[in-house]
């Protein structure tokens, strides 16, 4: 079970605004999933190493050169998608007042 | 238009060679059919008509020049709308990417184009591929062609329906915990999730990176296999891909093929009639000389709990990129924190926000060991147990889903929706190849048989599926 305060805290960490009604709703829904996953406690994992992936590949390297598309075209396609920009720069809302 | 009825990729290829129809005619047939029927099923979000016709014309030119054409040349294919097609919208079913235009082709699209396939359009999906019913799309729910009051499964519901409703000859989907196999099962088509590492995800909009895999839908196993063979292969832009030519393919002798039936997949929660259909399919393997063995996968019951920790954790990290600054939906706020809060509150739907918050919680200070690390340990046990079982059998058979397609709006509680992935998630956590093939109907709704193989034995899985399909058709 998680509290309303915890839901508000997570939402803030995740940068998602919630209204009071949503806090209540997500508290209920997140709690039911968290209660469900509690069942993992039944399993003894004392001497088990955690895995984060399944292929066993490690430190796959490649040359650090611009790959596949060397044309300027893609750069402009990427920049053009910015909701707010000035020339080739992304515009970000003011951080310091 | 009877010449286009019940085509498969194989038959369409022959039709093109024999000049029974042109690639442009074939493409127009499907484009028209989609335009006519999309209101009913909502399986497509957008069409890539110009691109499709341009591709088709190229193929017709080749045929006119009497050049030989490859098996996928001129074949109309649908693509899940979380895979980038250069110059066309890619929404991932989300409001936050409603107007996002793909700046390049995904690796799989490059390969399909090179193979001459015709890309018809982008199919509907649960937002960011999160869901098991394709009800979570910002562009409306998709309907099951067998009963439009029911869901097609998800998250690749649009692709499954596109194949089932004959809006294309094959489709691409993505499968993180069952998102290709479960909708294939609900819509009566073949859906294959390759081993993790077989297909490049470069240009697939990321959901949970240790699980995401691009898969294929087809009307037949042969068609599905053809698409898979075209898109697979190592890619240096996806460092998790492997060189499949290194793997020894186990030689197949059906006479002594050992098939494992894990008892945990046939217990509580499974629909009685679904169970009967799957058991009948298993019997068929016995009749053609395979050895049927009872096996145990004791962690099955825990796989879903592991999945609902690891997947949201990865989701919360992957989706932090949607900040309304570089691309996508953006708030008008002039304060940075306000801007983030507003953009993500309005841009994301409920299920997406739920999973981001769940992931943020299990990764947050003080909880990581109890949830995330614990889940990673159990994941290791699940993988190990599969490896042990695959020492005793070559292949595992299970139901794909515990029930046939459920009603739209039926599963309001998120946890009950999550439970519909209970049979597909284990193979995802272990990175194994798995395919769902149709094995009959229950009250007019399709049922799927899931065939799971050892890691990187993708060919074996498809050959066994092919064997089953042929034995049923004979």
Image (cartoon, helix red, strand yellow):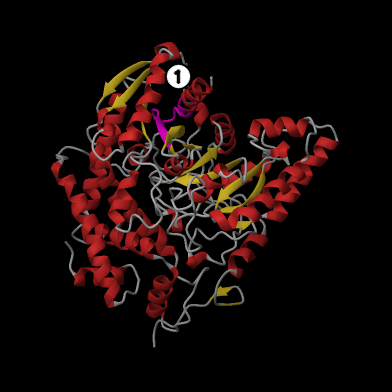
Corner quadrant of residue B118: top right
The count of marks equals 1
Residue, x 43% and y 51% (percent of image)?
B150
Location of residue B129 in the rendering, given as x and y in whole percent from the top left corner: 44, 53
Q: Chain of mark 1?
A: B
Q: Is residue B28 left or right of residue B130?
A: right
Q: Is residue A71 magenta?
A: no
Location of residue A93 in the rendering, given as x and y in whole percent from the top left corner: 46, 81
- Give the SS element for disc 1: loop
**Is B275 or B238 nearer to us in this picture?**
B275
Q: Is residue B452 magenta?
A: yes
Point out the stretch of residues depicted in magenta.
B447-461
Residue picked out by circle 1: B250
Location of residue A63 in the rendering, given as x and y in whole percent from the top left corner: 53, 46
**Is B421 or B55 nearer to us in this picture?**
B421
**Is B255 or B339 nearer to us in this picture?**
B255
Residue, x 50% and y 25% (percent of image)?
B469
Residue, x 43% and y 39% (percent of image)?
B196
Outermost residue, bottom direction? A97
Q: Would residue B85 be visible to someone looking at this image?
A: no
Q: Is residue B447 left or right of residue B354?
A: right
Residue B350, compared with residue B461, is above or below; it is: below
Residue B106, compared with residue B363, is above or below; it is: above
Residue, x 46% and y 32% (percent of image)?
B437
Q: Is residue B101 left or right of residue B413?
A: right
Residue B103, compared with residue A87, is above or below; it is: above
Location of residue B137 in the rendering, given as x and y in whole percent from the top left corner: 46, 60
């Amino acid at each position: 079970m998680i509290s309303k305060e915890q839901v508000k805290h997570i939402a803030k960490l995740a940068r998602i605004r919630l209204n009071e009604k949503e806090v209540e709703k997500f508290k209920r829904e997140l709690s039911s999933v968290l209660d469900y996953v509690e069942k993992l406690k039944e399993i003894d994992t004392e001497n088990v190493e955690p895995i984060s992936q399944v292929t066993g590949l490690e430190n796959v390297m490649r040359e650090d050169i611009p790959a596949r598309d060397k044309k300027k075209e893609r750069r402009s396609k990427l920049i053009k998608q910015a909701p707010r920009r000035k020339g080739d720069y992304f515009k970000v809302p003011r951080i310091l007042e | 238009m009877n010449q286009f009825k019940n085509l498969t990729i194989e038959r369409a290829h022959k039709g093109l060679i024999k000049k029974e129809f042109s690639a442009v005619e074939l493409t127009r047939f499907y484009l028209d059919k989609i335009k006519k029927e999309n209101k009913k099923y909502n399986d497509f979000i957008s069409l890539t008509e110009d691109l499709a016709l341009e591709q088709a014309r190229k193929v017709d030119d080749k045929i006119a020049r009497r050049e030989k054409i490859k098996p996928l040349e001129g074949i109309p294919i649908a693509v899940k709308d979380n895979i980038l097609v250069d110059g066309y919208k890619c929404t991932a079913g989300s409001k936050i990417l409603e107007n996002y235009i793909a700046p390049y082709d995904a690796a799989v699209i490059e390969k399909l184009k090179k193979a001459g396939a015709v890309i018809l359009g982008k199919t509907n999906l649960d937002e960011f591929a999160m869901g098991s019913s394709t009800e979570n799309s910002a562009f409306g729910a998709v309907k099951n062609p067998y009963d439009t009051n029911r869901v097609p499964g998800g998250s690749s519901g649009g692709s499954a329906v596109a194949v089932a409703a004959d809006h294309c000859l094959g489709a691409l989907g993505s499968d993180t915990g069952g998102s290709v196999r479960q909708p294939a099962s609900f819509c009566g088509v073949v859906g294959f999730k390759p081993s993790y590492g077989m297909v490049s995800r470069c240009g697939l909009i990321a959901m949970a990176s240790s699980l995401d895999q691009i898969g294929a839908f087809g009307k037949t196993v042969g068609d599905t296999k053809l698409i898979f063979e075209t898109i697979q292969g190592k890619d240096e832009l996806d460092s998790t891909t492997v060189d499949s030519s290194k793997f020894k393919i186990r030689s197949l002798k059906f006479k002594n093929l050992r098939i494992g039936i894990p008892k945990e997949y046939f217990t509580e929660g499974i629909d009685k009639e679904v169970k009967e259909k799957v058991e009948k399919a298993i019997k068929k393997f016995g009749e053609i000389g395979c050895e049927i063995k009872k096996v145990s996968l004791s962690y099955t019951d825990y796989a879903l709990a592991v999945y609902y920790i690891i997947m949201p954790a990865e989701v919360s990290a992957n989706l932090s990129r949607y900040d309304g600054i570089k691309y996508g939906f953006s708030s008008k706020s002039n304060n940075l924190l306000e801007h983030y809060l507003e953009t993500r509150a309005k841009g994301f739907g409920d299920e997406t926000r739920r999973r981001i918050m769940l992931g943020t919680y299990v990764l947050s200070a003080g909880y990581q060991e109890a949830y995330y690390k614990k889940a990673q340990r159990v994941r290791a046990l699940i993988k190990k147990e599969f490896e042990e079982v695959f020492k005793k059998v070559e292949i595992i058979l299970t139901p794909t889903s515990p029930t046939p397609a459920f009603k739209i709006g039926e599963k309001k509680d998120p946890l009950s929706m999550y439970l519909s992935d209970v049979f597909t998630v284990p193979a995802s956590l272990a990175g194994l190849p798995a395919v769902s093939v149709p094995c009959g109907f229950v009250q007019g709704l399709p049922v799927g048989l899931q065939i799971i193989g050892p890691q990187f034995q993708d060919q074996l899985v498809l050959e066994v599926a092919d064997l089953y399909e042929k034995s049923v058709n004979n």
